Amino acid sequence: MSKVVAIVGATGAVGVEFLSCLDHRKFPIKELRLLASARSAGKALPFKGKPIPVQELTERSFDGVDIALFSAGSGISKKFGPIAVKAGAVVVDNSSAFRMDKDVPLVVPEINAEAIKTHKGIIANPNCSAIISITPLWPIHKVNRILHMNIATYQAASGAGAAAMEELEASTRAYLDGKDYAPKVLPHPYAFNLFSHNADIDLATGYNGEESKVIAETRKIFGDPDVRISITCVRVPVLRAHAVAVTFQCEKPITEKEARDIIAKAPGVRLVDDRAKNYFPMPRDASGGEDILVGRIRQDLGDPTGHSIALFVAGDQLLKGAAQNAVQIAELL
Ligand code: A2P
């Protein structure tokens, strides 16, 4: 049955990808309502070749809406999410506002699709680094429990929104032209540089918000509060796909072949693991694609007991890390 779908934050980096995912995945749409700030009212965005006007988000925006896809930041979700639910919509929220709420399912369809059934109006879309890191690991965890993951992320500009992507391009151009560029969106010079993730840092523990999200959200999505996670999140000068180095330790011994065979069959994942050509997952290859690329699968030599595997992953932050995962949830609804 066709649905009335609203997109909150339609003009943002994730917002425009909602449009392309809905189109590309042939989501049955009766009416599409594009919502953003007053600054964007009057603009139009193309959908299936036709311009759709962008409206200012207001408390009346959700009348008659079946599904509301939110990606306009936590504050907007906290304020307007409950308003949308009250108006009768089911909210799929890409922000962190409700992810750890015990009444809100936090869903990666390839991992815990059944959690959707427990929703009370809001379903949360997980953090992009969590989705991209753990989707390939879940089929292994199911057969040989993962006790510990050691994660290092290489995160693209897109995770900080459209303005950060523009900043990466503009600052790179300025650098090459020998001009000064004062960072406006991110805290440090971005061209030909990388830095610790820009999320707020906890002064007591030294962990930033991105790292804390991946730890807490992985435990919730896996339904395993005991999985141990070591993590460092870093922003790199890449436009839109995150890469992640993961080493994980299992309960029972695991060989490289066993890990590769399981991952080769994992939904939403594609092996890119050509040692002879030194060809492995790259953000460039992951960008614009639906699959999470996995490669460099090898025994972790740091664990002589044979319980640990190392691998490298790349996935489109705006697609599987955000819009596509949310649209997959909407499809299941
Ligand atoms: P706008 O383009 O009108 O500012 P990104 O994650 O790429 O930074 O995008 C954020 C999205 O959230 C944009 O679509 C932006 O709309 C939207 N947004 C930001 N503030 C508001 C607001 N106060 N009301 C509605 N939408 C907002």
Image (cartoon, rainbow, N blue to C red):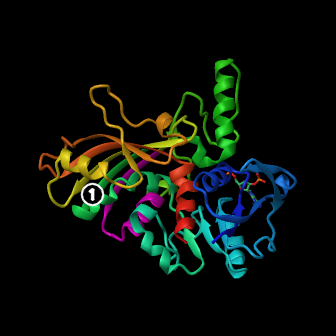
Q: Which residue is found at the position 79% from the left and 70% from the top?
A: 61
Q: Is residue 223 magenta?
A: yes
- Residue drawn 53% across the image and 40% down it: 287
Residue extent of the magenta highlight? 212-233
Q: Does 247 appear in magenta?
A: no
Indicate the position of residue 19 as horizontal and vertical percent values.
Answer: 67, 53
Left or right of 218 in this view: 17: right
Q: Quadrant of the C terminus?
A: bottom right
Estimate the x, y position of residue 113 in percent, counting from the top left. 44, 69
Which quarter of the image is occupied by the N terminus?
Answer: bottom right
One can see residue 197 in this view: yes
For residue 301, above or below residue 10? above
Q: Where is mark 1, residue-wise?
A: 140
> Relative to residue 306, is residue 136 drawn left or right?
right
Residue 208 visible in the snapshot: no
Mark 1 element type: helix
Q: Position of residue 104 (x, y in %)?
A: 52, 75
Q: Could you say where residue 66 lies in the image, as x and y percent from the top left? A: 67, 73
At a point 45% along the width and 74% down the height, the residue shown is: 115
